[in-house]
């Protein structure tokens, strides 16, 4: 059986990395945007609640997406690797037909250990490459990229062994995503992950905020929180490679861009662009 | 500055992942093969001894490659991230001109933290995509893939937190490479890494053995040791996601293929092929 990931053909769909605790009751800006990207009233949405241990996580999102005009939703109930290896025909068909895929919060390692290398993950990968939007909130956001923060400790500055990385879905190779960023004080663990190899860009996504990564590798920020972009590629020194050390790690010359809603960031040039000034507000 | 990795165009060069302690004195089969893949007498070889703390590592390899008929060798002396960010013109030119790149052993985290996201790494990536052979021994082998085992503990069975992953060079997305495999009893840490996301294939390379990954994604084994291929994609259960656990981790249904020299493995189909029977030996 060939479980390889096909190389993307054409333009991939957008990725929506949500920092968790997104508004589900009021204007639901982030979830509304997901439905719009999936085709609005014509959206065919698959919901993957596998990361969560709560029974009604999938149905709750289905009700919200219905309320936001998406008629067709399908909750994929995968609770074991055995089910992911031999999914019901109906499940695979729903994934094959999806225009939008939504991955809930919970434990991201549960997602990667249950879904990694399965036919279901291979179809998801292929659908995204063909243009479907993929959104994840909290654990679901962490899973989107090639390198996923599996777990770690809180705190503003990096220290040894404070972060554990694992392979994620691999829908983007540009970034490492962290979530609940401001609320759980996660700059330190994101810096630690980036020190290991400063090639990647860190995206720290606050609660009720989302980073939308489009096919042109532009990050767009929406919601009611910020996205902190961490670029360590120009850092001139770190002792992160000193594996006999315990405790704090130094790193010089990291660039932070804090993107409020409406701001953009170009992953190719590594330049941030301001939000457009709203009319009628004091200048 | 655009530090992104260009997408490979055309066929990439071979990767040679050496398990460390390769023969440097007798027939030097593995190093000889590297020189041949780089063009033999026409080879233009760049040696990166950055992982090593020994002063003469680079020059020692240069002498061996000369003895194996490669006239043109260049040792890149990068000992800090500052040097990797602003390499001498001569260094960048040598990398641009290389037909073969050899990465020595030492500490693989030193390689990824010093070189990750630098112009030097970007040129290396591009040269490989354009056909140059890239070989790494020990730490240099670990660095080749997208997911690198940064450090970990010995032992035959997986247990929690026994392995730390970091982003590597990303010259292949198919495998996680471990080295000194039999000699340092590393099946447990490789299994642990694969449990995190069973999508990838593990290559455990013994000392004085090498796994050559060609552009068709076929692994060829040479040298005087074996390569253990670990495929966890069909595993039906693991509790690797149970992050509150300490101690042993279970995983059911992992496939092992132990490849002796001459054997091959197809990363696309995940099938091993036997070595051809040598004539004149008892059958």
Image: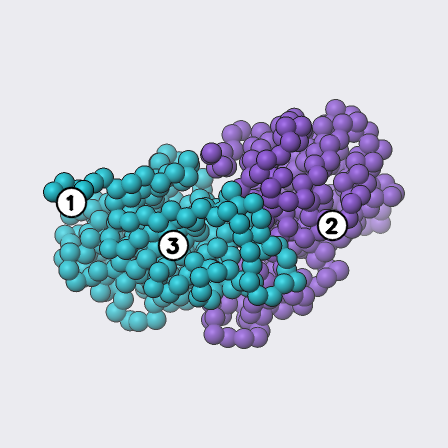
Chain colours: A cyan, B purple
Residue B75 position within the rendered picture, expressed as x and y whole percent measured from the top left: 73, 35
Q: Of discs 1 and 2, which sits in the foreground?
A: 1
Of residue A95 and residue B144, the one placed in the foreground of this image is B144
Residue A183 position within the rendered picture, expressed as x and y whole percent measured from the top left: 34, 64
SS for callout 1: loop
Q: Which mark is residue A282?
A: 1
* Labels 1 and 2 within one chain: no
Judge from the rendering whether residue A27 lies leftward or rightward of residue A54; answer left or right: left
Judge from the rendering whether residue B226 lies leftward or rightward of residue A144; answer left or right: right
Please tell me how crowded label 1 is: few (under 14), some (14-19), or many (20+) other residues with Cα within 10 Å. Answer: few
* Labels 1 and 3 within one chain: yes
Judge from the rendering whether residue B138 lies leftward or rightward of residue B244; answer left or right: right
Please tell me how crowded label 2 is: few (under 14), some (14-19), or many (20+) other residues with Cα within 10 Å. Answer: few
Q: Which mark is residue B203?
A: none
SS for callout 2: loop
Real-space Cα separation, disc 3 to disc 2, in angstroms = 35 Å
Q: Residue furthest top?
A: B42
- The residue shown at (44%, 61%) is A156
SS for callout 3: strand
Residue B156 position within the rendered picture, expressed as x and y whole percent measured from the top left: 66, 67
Q: Earlier in the sequence, mark 1 or mark 3?
A: 3
Q: Report the residue marked by disc 3.
A: A204
Of residue A90 and residue A29, the one placed in the foreground of this image is A29
Q: Report the residue marked by disc 2.
A: B53
Real-space Cα separation, disc 1 to disc 2, in angstroms = 59 Å
B108 over A83 or under it: above or below: above
Q: Looking at the image, can residue A121 be seen?
A: no
- The residue shown at (40%, 57%) is A178
Q: Looking at the image, can residue A260 be seen?
A: yes
């Amino acid at each position: 059986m060939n479980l390889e990931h096909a190389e993307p053909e054409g333009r991939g769909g957008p990725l929506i990395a949500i920092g968790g605790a997104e508004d589900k009751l009021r204007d639901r800006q982030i979830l509304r945007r997901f439905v719009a990207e999936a085709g609005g009233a014509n959206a065919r949405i698959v919901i993957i609640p596998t990361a969560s241990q709560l029974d009604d996580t999938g149905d709750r999102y289905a009700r919200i997406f219905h309320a936001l005009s998406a008629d067709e939703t399908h909750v994929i109930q995968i609770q074991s690797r055995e089910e992911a290896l031999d999914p019901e025909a109906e499940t695979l068909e729903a994934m094959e037909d999806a225009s939008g895929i939504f991955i809930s919060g919970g434990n991201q390692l549960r997602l990667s250990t249950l879904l990694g290398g399965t036919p279901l993950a291979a179809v998801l990968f292929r659908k995204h490459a063909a243009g479907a939007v993929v959104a994840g909130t909290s654990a679901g956001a962490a899973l989107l990229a090639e390198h996923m923060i599996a777990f770690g400790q809180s705190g503003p500055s990096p220290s040894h062994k404070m972060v554990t990385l694992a392979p994620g879905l691999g829908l983007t190779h540009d970034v490492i995503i962290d979530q609940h960023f401001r609320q759980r004080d996660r700059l330190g663990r994101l810096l630690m992950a980036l020190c290991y190899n400063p090639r990647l860009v860190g995206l720290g996504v606050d609660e009720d905020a989302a980073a939308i990564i489009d096919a042109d590798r532009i990050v767009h920020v929406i919601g009611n929180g910020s996205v902190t972009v961490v670029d360590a590629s120009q850092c001139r020194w770190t002792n992160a490679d000193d594996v006999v050390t315990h405790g704090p790690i130094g790193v010089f010359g990291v660039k932070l861009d804090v993107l409020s809603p409406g701001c953009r960031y170009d992953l190719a040039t590594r330049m941030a662009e301001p939000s457009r000034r709203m009319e009628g507000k004091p200048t």
